[in-house]
Image (cartoon, rainbow, N blue to C red):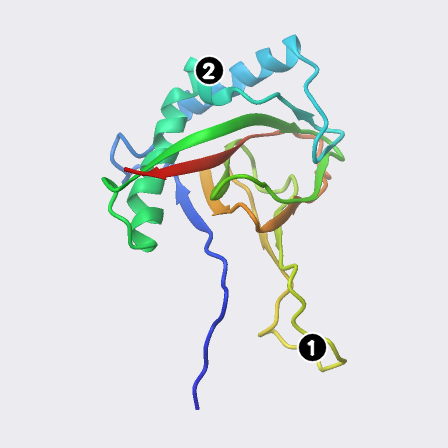
Amino acid sequence: MALELLFPNYVFHRQLTDENLHERQGVSFEYLQSLKDEMDSMRARDEGRLVSNRNGWQSNDGCESNPRFQKLMNRIVRMFDDEVLPFYGFNAGDVSVQIGNSWANINGHMCWNSPHLHNGCWYSGVFYIHADGDEGDIDFIDTDEKVVHDMPPSPMIQMSSHKQPTTGKLMLFPSGLMHMVEPNMTQKERYSISFNINYHMN
């Protein structure tokens, strides 16, 4: 007998507030507070835009060029160099990656994001600047039909995977992986940065 796993999606995680990370890999809680303050200022200046967000505030693109976010952008690229490129068999010197665009999100009470994917890039991701974990999961949704006839429920066949956002968590996922954000049922606000990653061969 042979068993194959065909066409999986690879999602990479790193806790950037982990004290065991090198200083060029992680960030401090003080830095995250400065990003939260910057996002509050951005929201006060700009009403934002409507894309997949429902009721929540989303900034326009441009966080990648905001000086306050440069350290975070460097940490995202560093994780890509450390984890993603070697996993796919690339040497960091053979491939250059950069943040193509990024935007800020603030989801308050009853705010959510409808199912969507990110076109025009290789990987996408999200970093949680402030999240207690109970403001709504991020759900990854399998859009490939696995069963075309009735069958008993099986834990081996999952159509979605739920991840709990917490402060300092960085997630990288293929841009074509459908995902959504569940409604925030609390009275708190969750702060995050979303981004897309482009690359070219050196």
Kind of residue at disc 2? Asn
In 3D space, how far apart are the residues under numbered discs 1 and 2 (Cα atoms)?
48 Å
Outermost top residue: 45
Relative depth, front residue between 25 and 5: 5
Q: Which residue bears the numbered disc 2?
A: 66
Can residue 162 be seen? yes
Point out the tag, 1 or 2, that comes first from the N-terminus: 2
- The residue identified by callout 1 is 153
The quadrant holding residue 111 is top right
Identify the secondary structure beneath mark 1.
loop
Q: Quadrant of the C terminus?
A: top left
* Label 1: how many Cα within 10 Å (few below 14, some 14–19, many 20+): few
Confirm whether residue 28 shows in the render: no
Q: Position of residue 156 (x, y in %)?
A: 57, 74
The secondary structure type at the circle numbered 2 is loop
Q: Nearer the viewer, residue 153 or 114?
A: 114
Position of 131 with respect to 182 (left or right) is left
Instruction: Name the residue at 45% across, 17% down.
Output: 65
Disc 1 vs disc 2: which is toward the camera?
Answer: 2
Tell me the residue at 58%/11% (across/down): 41
Image quarter of the N terminus = bottom left
Give coordinates of residue 27: x percent, y percent.
36, 29
Residue 76 located left or right of residue 167: left
Drawn side of residue 45 relative to residue 197, left or right: right
How crowded pointer 2 is (Cα within 10 Å; few <14, some 14-19, many 20+) is rated as few
Indicate whether 180 appears above or below 24: below
Locate residue 97: give its quadrant. top left
Identify residue type, mark 1.
Answer: Pro
**Place of residue 100 in the rendered image (x, y in percent of width and height, measured from the top left):** 47, 30
x and y, in percent, of residue 186 in the image: 70, 36
